[in-house]
Image (spheres, grey):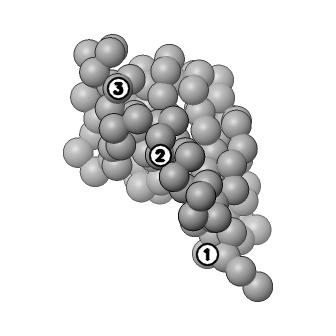
Amino acid sequence: MAVTQLLIHAPTVDALKRAQNNARNLLKLEPDAQVEIVVNGPAMSLAVTLNDEDILSRLVLCRNSLRAQGLTAQPQVKEVDAAVQYLAQQQLKGWSYIRA
């Protein structure tokens, strides 16, 4: 069976809370799944405060949103130039997309 590759888009604070639960629930069922939580917009204010190592390892933060809000990502968190571009590129590579 193919490994699930899932992008969970979290543009709001509530969406980021749901995304964390979505990721945990999927990983309970499929421990080998590749899951990324792509964060932009208002969700960034919560994303930069998270400290759960398993979630941090799955976060992908939008630099445009970080800059616009004057925020700094945790050192171990992946950053991309633009969430919209990253989401599109990953889907072209076969990743599935859901919005939390």
Dot 1 and dot 3 residues touching (CB under 8 Å): no
Question: Residue 29 at what x, y percent from top left?
Answer: 76, 68
* Quarter of the view holding residue 57: bottom left
Question: Residue 64 at what x, y percent from top left?
Answer: 35, 26
- Mark 3, residues whose alpha carbon is within 10 Å: few (<14), some, or many (≥20)? some
User: In this rendering, is residue 50 above or below 96?
Assistant: above
Going by the numbered disc 2, the residue's amino acid type is Tyr
* Quarter of the view holding residue 79: top left
Tell me, yes or no, if residue 21 can be seen here.
Answer: no
Q: Residue at x 63, y 69 (%)?
A: 33
Sequence-earlier tag: 1 or 3: 1
Disc 2: which residue = 86
Label 1 or label 3, whichever lies nearer to me, is 3
Disc 3: which residue = 64
* Quarter of the view holding residue 21: top right
Q: Looking at the picture, tell me which residue is in the foreground, 75 or 70.
A: 70
**Disc sitting over residue 32 in the figure:** 1
Where's the C terminus, which quadrant? Answer: top right
- Mark 1, residues whose alpha carbon is within 10 Å: few (<14), some, or many (≥20)? few
Label 2 or label 1, whichever lies nearer to me, is 2
Going by the numbered disc 1, the residue's amino acid type is Asp
Sequence-earlier tag: 2 or 1: 1
User: In this rendering, is residue 32 above or below 7?
Assistant: below
Where's the N terminus, which quadrant? Answer: bottom right
Tell me, yes or no, if residue 18 can be seen here.
Answer: yes
Dot 2 and dot 1 residues touching (CB under 8 Å): no
Relative to 31, is 82 on the left or the right?
left
Q: Residue at x 26, y 16 (%)?
A: 70
Secondary structure at numbered mark 1? loop
Q: Looking at the picture, tell me which residue is in the foreground, 15 or 29.
A: 15
Q: CA distance from mark 3 to mark 2?
A: 12 Å
